[in-house]
Image (spheres, rainbow, N blue to C red):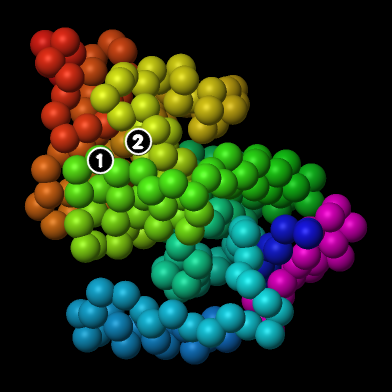
Amino acid sequence: MSPAVLLVGKEAERLAARLAISGYAPLRGSQLPLARAAEALRAVEASGAAEVPAAAESEHGPGPQAVVISPGSEGQIAVLRQRWGAIPLLLGIDQDTVANRCRTLNSGADDFWLCSLGPSDLLTRLRLHLKLLQRDGADELLQEGDLQVLPSSRQVKRGQRVLALTAREYELLLLLLRHRGAVVSREQILREIWDDQPSSASNVIEVYVRYLRQKLEEAGEGRLIHTVRGQGYSLGETLPARHRDSA
């Protein structure tokens, strides 16, 4: 079955034909009830409730596996994240600058695509993110303390609290959880999560670890991701004794 990709905004929707030729099933955001979802999200935020009620599936069938967002449409990201969880969200930018990269991460998107390069850059990034999604097809429940991850549904919970993670945050957490109790090196993280991309600056790992810690500890929970100086990161309720001097 062709991977479904939701296109949000006019610039993204103009790529529908090219995506279809490349083996994807494009869904036009203008045909889905995103406006009603946005209204629901604003109502939930105003009331202080925990999450947006799940909407019914659209007439197009199951939800998308990735979302391509036009430049200037980042206001939709909160709705998209609440609606479809940790699927890849790719935000369009006009130029590859540090400011635009920061804006992408701060908006809640997982990655960007360069509009000036046409479909080629987008297709490359889509292939990468969909490959990451295919790595976690197992049905077993992964657990460490009060942290639970169900890969088949990509659901992440800390106690009774459901965590809304980006696709990269989810993949990083899954890698650490599958090696819980051991130290995962920075080199392994770059290799498995970023495919050793030369453009991936080394400090990107610290950025995503910080994001993950903030979400994992948002309600005052104890630390689960520990830094082992000069070696990498370890996930567990406590750091293994042999590494405590390096923390």
Tag of residue 152: none
Question: In what element is the residue under mark 1?
Answer: strand
- Asked whether the viewer can see residue 193, the reply is yes
Q: Specify the farthest residue to the right.
A: 21
| Residue type at numbered disc 1 | Glu
Q: In the image, which residues are magenta?
A: 13-31
114 up-or-down from 187: above or below = below
Question: How far apart are the two marked residues, 2 and 1, measured between alpha carbons?
Answer: 7 Å
Total numbered badges shown on the rendered structure: 2
Identify the secondary structure beneath mark 2: helix
In the rendered image, which quarter is residue 244 located in?
top left
Q: Quadrant of residue 231?
A: top left
Which residue is painted at 35% across and 35% down in the image?
177
**Residue closest to the eye, 52 or 36:** 52
Q: Which label sits on residue 177? A: 2
Residue under numbered circle 1:
144
Q: How dense is the environment of label 2, judged by Cα within 10 Å: few (below 14), some, or many (20 and up)?
A: many
> Answer yes or no: do the residues labelled 2 and 1 have beta carbons within 8 Å?
yes
Above or below for 142 versus 13: above
Residue for point 44% across, 80% down: 54
Amino acid on which disc 2 is placed: Leu
The question of residue 23 being in magenta is answered with: yes
Return the x and y of residue 239 as percentages of the image width and height: 16, 24
Q: Looking at this rendering, what residue extends furthest in the front direction?
A: 140
Which part of the image, by quadrant, shows the N terminus? bottom right
